[in-house]
Amino acid sequence: PNNSMILVGLVLALLLIFRVKNSKRYRLPPGPTALPLIGNLPQLDKNAPFKSFIKFSETYGPVLTLYLGWQRTVVLVGYDAVKEALVDQADDFTGRGPLPFFLKATRGFGLAISNGERWRQLRRFTLTTLRDFGMGRKGMEEWIQEESKHLRARIETFKAAPFDPTFLLSRTVSNVICCLVFSQRFVYEDKQFLHLLNIISEILRFNNCPVGQLYNIFPWLMERLPGHQHTVFAQIEEIREFIRMKIQEHKETLDPSSPRDYIDCFLIRMNQEKHIPTTEFNYDNLVSTVLNLFLAGTETTSSTIRYALSVLIKYPHIQEKMQQEIDSVIGKHRCPNMEDRKSLSFTDAVIHEVQRFLDIVPFSLPHYALQDITFRGYTIPKDTVIIPLLHSVLKEEKQWATPWSFNPQHFLDQNGNFKKNPAFLPFAAGKRACVGESLARMEIFIFLVSLLQHFTFSCAEGPDSINLIPEYSSFANLPRRYQIIATPR
């Protein structure tokens, strides 16, 4: 045992020397002293790591260096630092870190974690395809209006008895992605569909739990240990298999002159570029990008809508005021559309405040230094993970009148008209901002307005039983689940 102790001592000493040498070579942003191997992990609040980041920034300023395990990480805190990096120095900060979990799930392909040419081509293609989805039969807006009718019909079947809306909302939102990607929706009872949605929420839970975080910090170790991570990767394989099957069906029925959906557009582009050796339009990128759209587009949007319902139950006067506004602008029968948003300032303000207050991805998705970056007089060395702490932007004292309370006035001027706030960045900012932002905003708006047209929401235990503090987690803030009552109006 003595020998191995000496060996461990030597390794630690070497790591320490390496660390000291490294920080001498660069002017790194300041930060707390890190331990070898485990870095600053022991100093983080494991239920809400971002709270620890905020604490550190009070000592070390808005740009600080932490070590998560041995991964050097620079955290950007507050609107000014985040905007300066992601918007003003956008080109330096477009890198995406190789998050081990997503690297394995996507095999390194697809839009979400790629960089360079692959990322540029896939992003441009995805943005254009999402934007052009007025092509062919129905625009995205009509898909969403259509789906909102199915949602309403389903809620009516509960006849004002309490129900948990979590799964229903996941199905609703996921169907919008299915329309976009597969040009079909699934009936809410479809066994396969339900199974896939179960897996998606399982993946999100995994990324939020300690095992998932350990996987991202020590992947080589977790690959070799038994545990839940192996189950989750087997489940991801099932989703990939489902996507491969759908792509096959699309190939067999493809009509290049009228693409039906995202997969068709991608297949057409694959055909056009099959002679270009460097093309990024290949099968692997298609499978992984569809997986990205699914994972990113289901839970975040449905959790936001579910959280909005909790807010309205907690503050019945806000719900009532929204209903009055909606009744006077749209009435009770016509389906809401995006044009209506301009006339519904209060409703729009409440929706913005829901997103600000929920703060669904407090860390954003990590960025990555693809080469040395000079920022505010510091050097962020190549291969550093960069976390733009969105939480610190959405809850920043100097940007919001009452950051810690739910207050739609944050988005209204004195005449009650909607007013923007530059620090509203729930979708991040810059070149890596959420590719589905316009789709998500359309869904949240149309689904909520159409629900409020037809129902009043409450819960049996009364408004005070609703706790708006999410079940804080690391990667995403997931709202608490409640049995809610939808009374037809």
Image: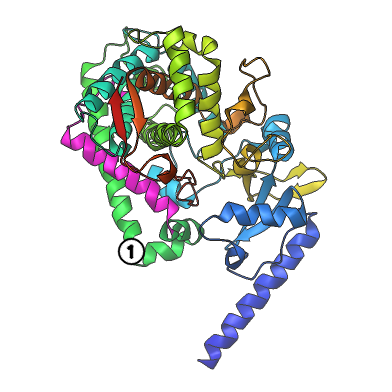
- Using the rendered image of the protein, determine whether residue 303 is visible from the camera's viewpoint: yes
Q: Is residue 287 left or right of residue 371?
A: left
Of 272 and 181, which appears nearest the observer? 181
Secondary element under disc 1, as helix, strand or loop, is: loop
Q: Is residue 197 left or right of residue 51?
A: left
Q: Quadrant of residue 414?
A: top right
Of 317 and 267, which appears nearest the observer? 317
Residue farthest bottom in this picture: 2
Of 385 and 442, which appears nearest the observer? 442
Q: Amino acid at mark 1?
A: Gly
Q: Is residue 444 left or right of residue 87?
A: left
In percent of width and height, residue 253 lies at: 21, 17
The residue depicted at 47 percent of the width and 20 percent of the height is 322
| Highlighted magenta segment, given as a residue range | 181-209
The quadrant of the image that shows the C terminus is top left
Q: Is residue 201 magenta?
A: yes
Q: Quadrant of residue 68?
A: bottom right
